[in-house]
């Protein structure tokens, strides 16, 4: 899912399961690289710690920005047509506030880091004028782009609010989707 929607939390929860091997690096951003097909060896090395787990996964929120990186769903499909996609969405205004705070702390307001522009220090101006803010919150658009390649049975949408407020039920649903036991 989009940044600030709990992908780090879910990554760490899943990596504790005995049937799931999550990548050593949480956000490898492999499938949005220009040279991704040349780096398979590097990508596989992120899972060297794998033993007998049934599921292998990674968590890169940039994969949810399919309008900026339109090839990501196809690249994932080409790599593994049987992949299962977990997409986390969050109430948009809360997500915008959270990503704004993170972006302020990472220097986007004084350095051109995205779209060759400096982000405004004013929240309202940032939301309206800094493209990445609203783009990542267009959840349905991004999910639809994955649906062009993956069956609905391969995509699980969960809500940040469900994950944080009804953790056990949501994790059980995710594990059922991944076809592993709840322990």
Image (cartoon, rainbow, N blue to C red):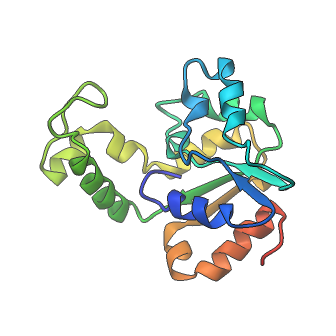
Q: Is residue 31 above or below residue 95?
A: above
Towards the viewer: 65 or 42 = 42
Residue 29 lies in quadrant: top right
Is 6 in front, or is 158?
6
Side (left or right) of 87 relative to 113: right
Residue lying at 68% horizontally and 66% vertically, measured from the top left:
16
Numbered marks: total:
0
Residue 56 in the figure: left or right of residue 42: right
Residue 20: image location, x then y, percent = 76, 59
Residue found 75% across the figure and 49% down from its top:
56
Q: Position of residue 150 (x, y in %)?
A: 75, 43
Q: x, y (%) of residue 31?
A: 61, 31
Q: On the picture, is 35 further left or further right than 81? A: left
Q: Position of residue 51 (x, y in %)?
A: 83, 52
Q: Quadrant of the C terminus?
A: bottom right
Residue at (87%, 54%) from the top-left corner?
52
Looking at the picture, does residue 87 appear above or below residue 47? Answer: below
Task: Between residue 71 and residue 164, name the one nearer to us.
Answer: 164
Above or below, 120 against 118 in this view is below
| Residue at horizontal 74 percent and vertical 42 percent from the top | 48
Where 173 falls versus 41 (above or below)?
Answer: below
Looking at the rendering, which quadrant does residue 170 occupy? bottom right
| Corner quadrant of residue 120 | top left
């Amino acid at each position: 899912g989009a940044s600030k929607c709990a992908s780090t939390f879910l990554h760490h929860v899943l990596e504790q399961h005995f049937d799931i091997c999550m990548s050593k690096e949480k956000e490898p951003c492999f499938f949005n690289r220009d040279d991704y097909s040349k780096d398979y060896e590097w990508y596989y090395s992120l899972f060297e710690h794998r033993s007998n787990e049934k599921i292998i996964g990674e968590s890169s929120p940039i994969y949810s920005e399919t309008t900026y990186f339109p090839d990501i769903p196809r690249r994932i499909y080409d790599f593994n047509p049987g992949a299962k996609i977990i997409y986390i969405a969050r109430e948009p205004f809360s997500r915008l506030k959270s990503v704004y705070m993170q972006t302020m702390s990472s220097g986007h307001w004084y350095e051109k880091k995205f779209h060759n522009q400096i982000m405004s220090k004013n929240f309202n101006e940032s939301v309206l004028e800094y493209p990445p803010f609203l783009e990542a919150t267009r959840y349905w658009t991004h999910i639809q782009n994955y649906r062009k390649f993956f069956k609905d049975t391969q995509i699980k949408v969960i809500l940040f609010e469900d994950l944080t407020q009804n953790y056990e039920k949501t994790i059980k649903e995710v594990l059922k989707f991944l076809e592993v036991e709840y322990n």
